[in-house]
Amino acid sequence: MPATSELAKNDQQLKLPSTCDALIIGAGVIGLMSAIRLREAGLSVVLCDQKHIGAGSSSGNMGMITPSHAPPLTRPQTIALLPKALLSPSAPVRIKMRFNRQFLGFAARFLRSCTNAHFQHAASACHQLLIRSRALYEELAESLPDSFEWTTRGLLTVSSHSRSRQDFDQEVEWLNSLGIAPRWLSRDEMYAIAPALSDNVASGWLHERDAHLKPDRLLQALLNRALSIGVQISDNTAVELSKMHRTDTTVTLNRQPLRAGNIVVTAGAWTPALLGNLMRHLPIEVGKGYSLTSPEPLPGLDRPLLLHDASAAITPWASSWRVGGTMEFCGQDPSLNKVRLNALRTAANDALKEPIGLEQAEPWAGFRPMSADGIPVIGRVPGCQSVYVAAGHSMLGVSMAPATAELVSALVCDTSTDIDPQPYDPTRFC
Ligand SMILES: Cc1cc2nc3c(=O)[nH]c(=O)nc-3n(C[C@H](O)[C@H](O)[C@H](O)COP(=O)(O)OP(=O)(O)OC[C@H]3O[C@@H](n4cnc5c(N)ncnc54)[C@H](O)[C@@H]3O)c2cc1C
């Protein structure tokens, strides 16, 4: 996959053991970090993926670490956007209506969650994981031998003249209440810290607590760490779970039986299908997003830009940059939609003086695991003795991964943690 081309494949031929303490299913950022945490806690761990590490949405994403994004999509204002999302193929959020039980259940739960009361609850739940993860990333950047381009210069939200300061005020009020208020910047201040910006930008906020990293380098650094501490990783290994797994955690991997003490499902947008025999309804849907990665660096930009009007973002790295975003609720359709990729090109052309390398940029699409109530699903699967789930991190999986892994490890090992597990408990969907 183009955007992951720098990620070396894990090509070791694994001779699978017949037992392990924990089997992790799905090697995205959540699965990798959970595997490392559990191994560090002393468990023997097998991590498998139906394809390979980073085959899901953890590779071509924007790499933004954003405590500022605690406020979820589930808010009363979102309902006003729905007619456009249903009718316009080029709207930043597009919904392809489907009449199956999974999608209708998701839609019903999403709509029920668009209240002010739920908004506050979901924002606090996300905030808890975001703030803890932000601190844990500092530790990872110190402790992992491989660099993942960890950069702590914040994130700049910009808007054209159409976005008034009053529009920002409501968002700022929410962030103030969470203790992460952004700083309003004048036009001159914005151009001083981001000279790459075009003249089209009129207003902006600096989210100083935000950070960014390079996703493929993060996965590579985590893979190296996992291998070095003895996590056994098996690519091209799809797992299926049946009703039997409520009590018996023996699974078939590559036609061999593996008796696992615990199973942790970290299969991102594929999680509802994988848990279908164990949980009647898990409202996680694909929120497909796109990115374009330029092979050249972008002078004059050293922190991510959130392009508010276009619902897109730009992230700069040492030797490349990426524009990405948009959201399609279209089921598991991996095709690259030209209209949406062109919308990203237009957003980059509008926001940047000189979008170097955009013509040669590599396209990518990934499935965000969108949870219907805007809160990740982390905990023991209801009715199961030793099956856990950690999925549904929506637009913030990279930002929330370290704290999610910490919580997974505490739940599986039955140890204490400062993270309150209650908001993420899967039983809320029973
Ligand atoms: C365009 C875009 C931009 C984004 N930008 C950001 C950002 O800036 N910051 C941020 O925090 N988040 C961002 N996200 C969201 C983030 O990428 C996701 O939330 C995160 O990657 C989810 O990680 P995951 O490990 O849960 O799932 P995934 O990375 O999707 O991994 C799931 C894995 O499970 C495997 N799998 C599935 N079924 C099976 C099975 N039966 N057996 C074995 N393996 C299986 C898949 O192959 C896959 O590798 C972005 C997403 C997109 C699409």
Image: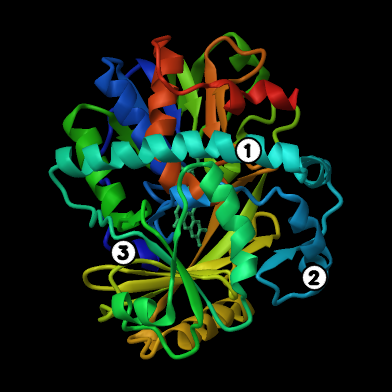
Residue labelled with disc 3: 5
Q: Which residue is mark 2?
A: 84
The residues bearing labels 1 and 2 have C-alpha atoms spaced at a distance of 25 Å
Instruction: Provide residue 283's location: percent of width, then percent of height.
Output: 71, 38
Above or below residue 307? Residue 287 is: above
Q: Which residue is mark 1?
A: 122
Residue 358 placement: quadrant:
bottom left
In the image, which is nearer the foreground, mark 1 or mark 2?
1
Q: How crowded is the residue under tag 3: few (<14 C-alpha within 10 Å), some, or many (20+)?
A: few
Graded by Cα atoms within 10 Å as few (under 14), some (14 to 19) or many (20 or more), the crowding at tag 2 reads: some
- Checking the image for residue 350, the label placed there is none
Does the Cβ of the disc 1 residue fall within 8 Å of ligand 1? no
Question: Of marks 1 and 2, which one's residue comes earlier in the chain?
Answer: 2
Please name whichever residue, 351 or 15, is drawn nearer the observer in this view of the structure.
351
| Up/down of 246 relative to 391, above or below | above
Question: Looking at the image, which residue is at 54% across and 52% down?
Answer: 395
Q: Position of residue 369 (x, y in %)?
A: 58, 46
**Which callout, 2 or 3, points to the residue nearer the camera?**
2
User: Mark 3 is on which residue type?
Assistant: Ser
**Quadrant occupied by the C terminus:** top right
Quarter of the image that includes the N terminus: bottom left
Considering depth in this image, is 191 or 396 the residue closer to the camera?
191
- Residue at 58% in and 45% down: 269
Q: Where is residue 161? Give x, y as percent.
A: 58, 84
Q: Secondary structure at mark 2?
A: helix
Dot 3 falls on a residue whose secondary structure is: loop
- Position of 61 relative to 389 (above/below): below
Give SS at disc 1: helix
Q: Amino acid at mark 1?
A: Ala
